[in-house]
Image (cartoon, rainbow, N blue to C red):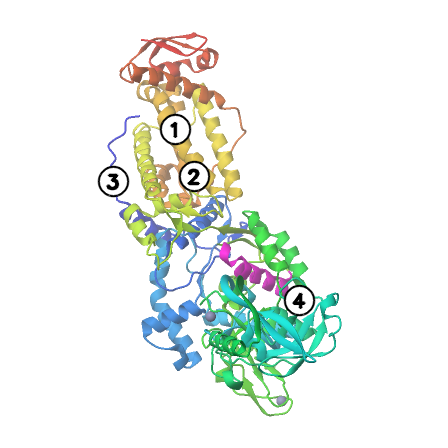
Amino acid sequence: MVMASLSKFDFKEIENKWKKFWEKEKIYRFNQKDKRKIYSVDTPPPYISGKMHIGHAFSYSQQDFMVRFNRMRGFNVFYPFGTDDNGLPTERFIEKINNVKSKDMGRLDFIKLCLKTLKEVTPDCIQDFKNLAISADYTLYYSTIDDHSRKISQQSFIDLYKMGEAYQKEFPTMWCPDCQTSIAQAELEDKEEKSLFSTIKFSCEGKPLFIATTRPEMLQACVAVFVHPSDKKYKNIVGKKAKVPLFNFEVPIIADTSADPEKGTGALMICSYGDKYDVDAINRYKLTPKLIFDKSGKLNIGEYKGLKVRDARKKILEDLKKENLITEQKEIKHVVNCHDKCGSEIEFIPTKQWFIKILDKKEKFIEQGNKIKWYPEFMHKRYDNWVNGLEWDWSISRNRHFGVPIPVWECKKCGEIILAQEKELPVDPLQVKKICPKCKSKAEPETMVFDTWATSSLTPQIADSLIGASGKIKLPYSLRPQGHDIIRTWAFYTIVKSYLHEKEIPWTDITISGNVSLGGEKMSKSKGNVVSPIDVMNNYGADALRFWAAGSKLGNDLDYQEKDLVAGTKMINKLINASKFVFMNLEEYNGKKPKKLEPLDELFLSKLNSLVKMSTESFENYEYSRVKQEVEQFFWNDFCDNYLEIVKRRVYQGSGDKKLSAQYTLYKTLLTIIKLIAPVMPFITEEIYQQYFRKNEKIKSIHISEWPKSEKIEDSSEFDVLKNNLSFVRQEKSKNKLALNSSVKKFFTPDYKIISKYKEDFISASGAEVISLGKEQKAEF
Ligand SMILES: [Zn+2]
Ligand SMILES: [Zn+2]
């Protein structure tokens, strides 16, 4: 095929044209009256904190491929778009651009400021997603801090409290001394650290008792010593008292199987609270905790008062040394639990917090997970591991200022909990005075807010109620697309809430996307290796960016490489040029199918049919990268390099049904190719469709046109035989420095029988004057 020189087409103009068209024609609008089956998406709401990043462009493109495929399959698509604005990132962002501190403002005033600011900046941020052709219905919009979401979040809590699934408890909770808030297990991050393992001399009835620990600063908080019941060394001291060095108070010695005879000296000091084992041990033996830390992680009693954990540790080690109370010391590496938001080591501090019961339902949550289809499947394992490893109920309260308020008041006199009434929601308890119904005293408002996941775990319910009375988009939704880093939070908590409220799974399918790297390295602002999707779109266009995003399997990471964007641009140009060429030859074509198709056209259409079947099945299994790859290969190789070459003379010079057969095949094939790749490259396919096909096809946009149907599959391998023989002839010509259109006197081939079926077309494409059977391929010039 002779290509016109590649003209750099103006993708900005094309993108703007179709974006406006789609909006004006409401192509992606959800229609409530539409009776077709609903395909519903629990769209991830991005944070509004500046510009879109490449990870967003990558994962939202991948979900959009699936949505567009299902729209063309004839579903009534429900694809809402929200933004997640109730967490720390938004708080910081709002503080920064308004130059305020949230803690200096009233909570309600800060929420008002957020809503006002978000209203100003959100359209710009959402525009990035529109520019990328994410085909959501942007009129179905929510923010997780708006009245609507606050109301649903508070109502959920009230319902759970009434069901007995939410409770308040003074409990040693995981606490971040830096952020000064309780945190959930899901926010923990493991960090390997070097630490000193010191053997310290306690005593029991005057005899030394050695105990090794990495946390000597906890000595003051020691409440017991554990030894293993079968540990012979300690048989005689069980039930006696141990004296704590430096502080000289006594604690009971208890036989408990949690003491490991192989670790350290085999004796274990139990402190309130060194770690989660301490919490567990102290609860089991109902020991009275001694609290030595305040909420900022400083010691608050005795001579070490005011010191931070690490400083206290250093000082106490020095003092122990002075008194010869350390017998051995070695450096070890061990894993410590840190807060994922700030990297600080967490402590356990007893505070009053709100929890949702989840530990008693682990099996149910595993069962719910099994009812959901996970793509890729191995991500399901991560969910199971998380649920099986749960050790605490879900802590949903945060001691922060900004967020969705917990809608309760508490009577300090009689302990009565007063819930907000439904008609009050959304409510900020700080703004409403309540009297205890029991003892008529003034009730205190709850000052804490919900953890962000307590609200975003309700995205299916929040999105559903956007279209009026809730319950229209029934659980389960068709799809939840999301990242792998939030399986244990967003996916898990959504499954929890849907189970607790509706005894239902939230979605039938969940897809998990990977990350974007640069040169194999994770992109990060601090490393300065960040690629902006806005720049990429400005340089290559949205279609090329999406084409790149289709290059990795779901769940896999993908490296950003310029050459992949160039490949996308080449694909776009080739589509434009091939379409021009095809329609040059279809000028007087009327869209009719001839009575009889030429054998070659029939063969080629059956090959096209296999491609349709493969593409449909692949999309159904979320294997969009396979569709991209196979359509690209079919288009370049089978269609442009071979089929067009073979039939061009029949179209130029032929007449009657022979010509009509080629024209029909060209039309049908090109239309099918652009439909198959439309979910990946929505702009260029719309451009080609509108320019050439719409007048015949009548449907307003390619994106609501019908997905190609695969008919009965027939063997099309003979097309590959033709391709192979043609390619041999071309190579021979080029070896002999002959023009590609020069003729071949005699061509020998073992495939003679097959080629004779398509003789006329093969002769026309190869220039062979005589074709004969031969043991091997041979061309004589
Ligand atoms: Zn923190
Ligand atoms: Zn009361």
- Mark 3 surroundings: few (<14), some (14-19) or many (≥20) residues within 10 A: few
Secondary structure of the residue carrying numbered label 4: loop
Q: Residue at x 30, y 12 (%)?
A: 743
Which picture quadrant has residue 727? top left
C-alpha gap between disc 4 and disc 3: 75 Å
The magenta span reads: 484-503
How would you classify the magenta stretch by its main secondary structure? helix
Mark sitting on residue 8: 3
Q: Percent position (x, y) of residue 102?
A: 40, 77
Residues marked 4 and 2 touching at CB (< 8 Å): no
Q: Percent position (x, y) of residue 752?
A: 45, 11
* Front residue (pair 752, 732): 732
Instruction: Name the residue carrying label 2.
Output: 628
Q: Percent position (x, y) of residue 701?
A: 39, 45
Q: Sequence-wise, which precedes: disc 3 or disc 1? A: 3
Q: Amino acid at mark 3?
A: Lys
C-alpha gap between disc 1 and disc 2: 14 Å
Q: Sequence-wise, which precedes: disc 2 or disc 3? A: 3
Mark sitting on residue 266: 4
Q: Sequence-wise, which precedes: disc 4 or disc 1? A: 4
